[in-house]
Image (cartoon, rainbow, N blue to C red):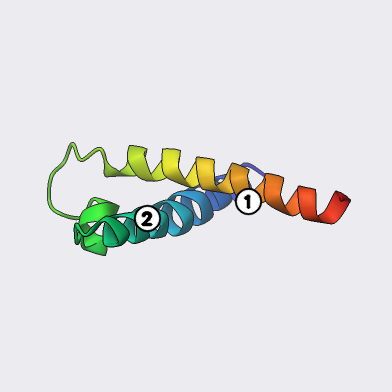
């Protein structure tokens, strides 16, 4: 069970939702950032990108969950 939660949190929320949401946000405001930069692969050991991706991914996941629940139960 712990492995399942780790996979869902790391892969779905942080990698998929977090990175892609931040990529689209930077693209919309006109600051082009690469996916490698946003995922923290730029070579910096203390890159805070994973933290930003996790926070962004959690916010988007919560909003999607509330939106889906609203649609289903209304």
Residue identified by numbered label 1: 64
Q: Is residue 26 left or right of residue 1?
A: left
Report the residue at 35% width, 37% height from top: 51
Q: Which of the 4 image quarters holds residue 45?
A: top left
x, y percent for residue 29? 27, 55
Report the residue at 31% width, 60% height from top: 28
x, y percent for residue 65? 68, 48
Foreground mark, 1 or 2?
1
- Packing grade of label 2 (10 A; few <14, some 14-19, many >=20) is many
Report the residue at 18% width, 36% height from top: 46
x, y percent for residue 68? 73, 54
Outermost residue, right side: 73
Report the residue at 70% width, 44% height from top: 66
Asked if the residues shown at circle 1 and circle 2 are in contact, with their CB atoms under 8 angstroms apart, the answer is no
Is disc 1 placed on a helix, strand or loop?
helix
Q: Is residue 67 left or right of residue 45?
A: right
Number of marks in the image?
Answer: 2
What label sits on residue 19 in the rendered view? 2
């Amino acid at each position: 069970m712990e492995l399942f939660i780790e996979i869902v949190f790391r892969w779905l929320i942080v990698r998929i939702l977090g990175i892609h949401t931040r990529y689209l946000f930077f693209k919309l405001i006109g600051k082009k950032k690469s996916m490698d930069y946003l995922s923290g692969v730029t070579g910096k050991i203390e890159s805070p990108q994973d933290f930003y991706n996790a926070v962004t991914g959690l916010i988007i996941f919560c909003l999607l969950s509330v939106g889906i629940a609203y649609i289903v139960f209304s």
